[in-house]
Amino acid sequence: MSTVARFHALLWGVFSLGGFIAAFFLPILIYINNIAYPLGLWPVTSKDPTRLLVINQTVSTLFVFAAVGGSLFHGIFRLSATLAELGLKKQEAKITALGYAIIAVGLLALGYYLWLLSPNIIPGLAPPWSK
Amino acid sequence: MSTKKTHYPEIPRKNLGPGWWLANRHYTVYMIRELTSFFVTAFSLIYIYQVYRLASNPGTYSQYLDTVRSPAMISFSIVALGFTLFHSVTWFYLIGKIQPIKIGRKKTSPLLALGINTVFLVIISFAVLQLFIVGK
């Protein structure tokens, strides 16, 4: 198998994993952060759920990274193909390139800001200002 | 044996317009399923922005929470949750269809995969609530 084919297979594998992550993790994150919290529904109290999830919390911060990062990869990968099917076939290469750029920037930004909020997610490597 | 290349006649293909998926119920359901990716992507990007606001300027973060509480954002989130759940259900069914598990001589059905994975979805959702939210 060529390197390009292997890389392509890897991307499809990550896409599939992202599909599972979005299917299992995303609905509950949308519910607690954007529906239960603003509407005061069970079981969220008046405390902001995002603060509870990502400030100095290792496991829930990793959950947020997996849920949002996996969903972002899956969503953009699938949306690029869908836009081509909706008549943007000629622009497919540009859309795909833009999609990968958004995935890369999004994942780096998510990882970086979560690390700032929960430095203990990377054991032994604290953010620069804490030294 | 001849090594001559065989040329097959090209099948004439109809040029499909952007609204081709409205012509048939199956195509429409297919496209709605694919368009769940828009809501998955949009929520992911919005949430990354929320994490950025919290990490970069906790002082003005409460202003962002007013946006989260706005009727427009709540309406969008309810629609996004509906589409995300539709993604979950169709994804579980699809996985059962393309990757059935062989048990003896029989293969599992897509409906069984949908049922089992839906139970897992409920268990995972309750686990997330219990571990990270309830009582904090």
Image: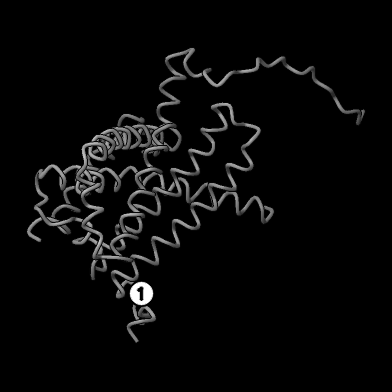
Mark 1 crowdedness (10 Å alpha carbons): few <14, some 14-19, many ≥20? few
Q: Identify the residue position indicated by label 1 in the image.
A: A122
Name, please, the residue furthest toward the top.
Answer: B23
Q: Quadrant of residue B116?
A: top left
Question: Could you say where residue A87 lies in the image, as x and y percent from the top left?
Answer: 58, 26
Q: Secondary structure at mark 1?
A: loop
Q: Residue at x 30, y 46 (%)?
A: A26
Question: Could you say where residue B133 lies in the image, as x and y percent from the top left?
Answer: 14, 56
Residue B1 in sight: no
Q: Residue at x 26, y 45 (%)?
A: A30
Asked whether, in this view, residue B103 is left or right of residue B62, the answer is: right
Q: Residue at x 40, y 26 (%)?
A: B32
| Position above or below: B34 against A32 | above
Task: Quarter of the image for the C terminus of chain A: give it.
Answer: bottom left
Question: Could you say where residue B64 lies in the image, as x and y percent from the top left?
Answer: 26, 53
Question: Could you say where residue A56 lies in the image, as x and y percent from the top left?
Answer: 23, 71
Amino acid residing under circle 1: Ile
Nearest to the observer: residue B18 or residue B94:
B18
| Position above or below: A45 against A58 | above
Residue B136 in sight: yes
Q: Residue at x 34, y 45 (%)?
A: B43
Asked whether, in this view, residue B18 is left or right of residue B15, the answer is: left
Chain name for mark 1: A
| Position above or below: B34 against B129 | above
Nearest to the observer: residue A56 or residue A48:
A48
